[in-house]
Amino acid sequence: MQNISLYWWKKRYLRAVLLTAALLLAAVLPVSCGYSEGGAAGPPPGEDDNPGGKEEDPENTGEEIDYRALGVNEAGEIMILMYHQIGEPEDVWCRTPANFRRDLETLYEAGYRLISMNDLLEGHIDIPAGCSPVVLTFDDGRGGQFRYMEKDGRQAIDPDCAVAILEEFHSAHPDFGLAATFYIFYEAPFEQYDLVQQKLSYLVKKGFEIGNHCYSHGNLRRLPPEEARRELGLHVKRTQEYLPGYAVRSLALPCGEFPGDMSYIIEGSFEGTAYHNEGVLLVGSNPAPSPYSINFKPAALPRVRASEMEVEGLGLYDWMEILHNHPERRYISDGDPDTVAVPEELTEGIDRLRLGDRTLIPYQNEE
Ligand SMILES: [Zn+2]
């Protein structure tokens, strides 16, 4: 993997890093990011009255967090995973339901917890101490992402579509969270024209997000600005017809194509409908910088392909391994969304403006 940059690497941190890695491994095994002593993966059965997916960790309240032991690094990188179709057979742009379930399980066991794209853009990361955030994105509004089927004369959600799999996983593992952004285009997102209203309302009610993927999947690099504005504005107009007042806040660039001038891609209007893409997502191929980092560029956020085919060493499992072997690159939460804890030597990489009201906590990474 020749393009893995190790610019941060300094020998004097080796010992701390090894210690962190060992502790992290121990922390990850009970799938609770090292903080619930019984190794339980969530609250006792029947206590999930928190459908938004944010679990309160009673053990974090008022307790000192050992940043060094947990390897806390809120300047670290965050994977934004990119999915397309969920279905059979496995292909470059299609993940099978079984593999999607395996992805969720593997992420969960490795200490990852879901946050939404909007949370990332706001720098609102509310996951337990020792865990790492991950963002799920689905492009193109394919049928396998959200499908209804006839069952016993009634409409039921296909248990093998992405939405059902995510909800099923969340009910078994409430502390994983429930979040994903669906970058759809029109006229028939999720390939069932009669059910668009029902599906979009359902998604928003469950806390999922709708993102812009152009009205008709237009190529934003080739389109003249006026047509690009139409593609972006008409998407928002149509989305708001289904979901009055809904704020579409991010854009996944169709085919990853973008023009040299991004100003009218980020913000503009078409026939009286304004659009503002606070985040713009690319197609490849590495984790995104921390939202508090000087390197965080919301108008060009890289994504990691959630695939094992033709990923050239840069797919989901490759990056999980890289971030496991180099935990100092990985975003590891301090468990408090109002503070940003980073090893002292990384504080110069923090953008004070992006911190907002959050308190920066530099800490000594060495004894
Ligand atoms: Zn697309």
Image: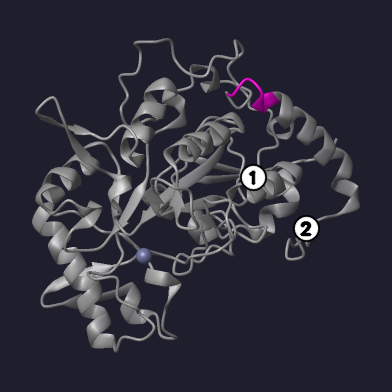
Residue 357 numbered tag? none
Q: Which residues are magenta?
A: 27-31
Please state which amino acid type lies under the numbered disc 2: Trp
Q: Residues within 10 Å of mark 2 (few under 14, many from 20)?
A: few
Q: How is the image coloured?
A: one colour
**Left or right side of 23 for 190:** left
Q: Quadrant of ligand 1?
A: bottom left
**Residue 240 versus residue 350: which sits nearer the camera?**
240
Q: Quadrant of the N terminus?
A: bottom right
Disc 1 and disc 2: Cα gap in Å?
Answer: 19 Å
| Vertical side of 108 occupied by 291: above or below | below
**Left or right side of 162 for 193:** left
Q: Quadrant of the C terminus?
A: top right
**Residue 154 versus residue 16: which sits nearer the camera?**
154
Report which residue position mark 2 lands on.
8
* Quadrant hosting residue 204: top left
- Predominant secondary structure, magenta span: loop
* Quadrant hosting residue 278: bottom left
Q: Residue at x 58, y 38 (%)?
A: 333
Q: Say if mark 1 contacts mark 2, CB within 8 Å.
A: no
What secondary structure is found at the residue carrying circle 2?
loop
Report which residue position mark 1 lands on.
320
Q: Residue at x 11, y 75 (%)?
A: 272
Image location (x, y in percent) of residue 58: 48, 17
Image location (x, y in percent) of residue 6: 78, 59
What secondary structure is found at the residue carrying circle 1?
helix
Q: How many marks do you count on the picture?
A: 2
**Left or right side of 90 for 49:** left
